[in-house]
Amino acid sequence: MATVEHCLCCFEALVAYHERRKPMSLSEIEKSWAEYINTIDDDDDDDDDDKEAPVSSKAPQIPALRRLAAATLPSSSTSSSTSLATSISTSSTSSSNTTLQSGISTPATSIASSASPAPPTPVYESPLFVTWNVVVQDSDDDDDVSLRGCIGTFEAQPLSSGLPSYALTSALQDTRFHPIGRAELPTLQVAVTLLTDFEPAADAMDWELGKHGLRISFVYRGRRYGATYLPDVAPEQGWTKEETVVSLMRKAGWEGNKSRWREVELRVVRYQGKKEKLGFEEYIAWRDWVDGMRGE
């Protein structure tokens, strides 16, 4: 599945584009993030030992980011971080294909009920989608999001290059929207979805809401159509399966009578994919920490 580091990589690519600098690589981000969340772990340990102890100035204080970090705490320490300068940090105040390593159970491990679960198998290449949203806080202090750009590929991509590439493509080349400008960065949230388990569906209803994404293709009056929805789209919109399929056909450009959609011969591929999302505030807190470790 997607990770926090994948989201950081997307934000880093977009921010670096606007700052006209070279972004940190995915491997650099992964190393710095591991050290960063160890800082959070160390700070929590200090709080347990001494409730009056001052909070480290280098430990992230954003609750959402601390929750993200707590979900990915490593079992061992890692190498030091790498940083590049960022100018946005001084002006902003705004804003996880996992395959669990099952292995073969042995007498020694099968009886150890307190053993830690096997870590996720690292993913280096995958089909992916990058989604940009604008976060709007409503009157009830709840965050609402609106789509700002979403582009991806069903062809497996090396994540080290695919993530930054599609982060920029989604932000700058989604023809439904104007390119994301630098002033919009503090309002953004990024979501990364790595796609897995592609399989042909028996028919347009052969899939599960909240589990599968859909990719359809069909020919209507001599013209070819195709479109996709990621697994989270239908639940977020509150659609039924039929409403999802009809909406997807509309998205592809079909203008037929929606009551007769079943007369269209659809080719349907279902797939899975869990996303991770991150807001600009969380990104910039990590980025400030990286710069602080370099004394910048």
Image (cartoon, rainbow, N blue to C red):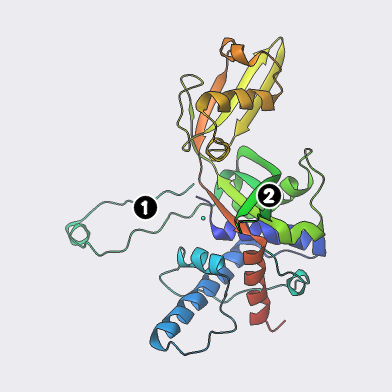
Count the marks: 2
Task: Determine which quarter of the picture holds residue 244.
Answer: top right
Secondary structure state at the residue bearing disc 1: loop
The answer to whether residue 40 is left or right of residue 94 is left
Residue annotated with mark 2: 132
Secondary structure state at the residue bearing disc 2: strand
Of the 4 image quadrants, the one containing the C terminus is bottom right
**Image x and y of residue 274, in percent:** 50, 46
Front-most of residues 140 and 285:
140
| Amino acid type at mark 1 | Gln
**Above/below status of 217 relative to 49:** above
Q: Nearer the viewer, mark 1 or mark 2?
A: 2
Front-most of residues 198 and 49:
49
Residue that appears at 65% across and 49% down: 145
Residue that appears at 63% across and 51% down: 144
Check if mark 1's residue and mark 2's residue have beta carbons within 8 Å: no
Tag of residue 101? 1
**Image x and y of residue 266, in percent:** 57, 17
Q: Is residue 10 visible?
A: yes
**Above/below status of 261 relative to 150:** above
Residue that appears at 22% across and 61% down: 113
Task: Determine which quarter of the picture holds residue 250.
Answer: top right
**Above/below status of 241 relative to 32:** above
The answer to whether residue 245 is left or right of residue 116 is right
| Amino acid type at mark 2 | Trp
Front-most of residues 140 and 100:
140
Q: Between disc 1 and disc 2, whose residue precedes?
A: 1
Residue that appears at 37% across and 52% down: 101
Structural distance between the alpha carbons of marks 1 and 2: 31 Å
Residue density around tag 1, few if under 14, some if 14–19, many if 20 or more, within 10 Å: few
Residue density around tag 2, few if under 14, some if 14–19, many if 20 or more, within 10 Å: many
The answer to whether residue 114 is left or right of residue 198 is left
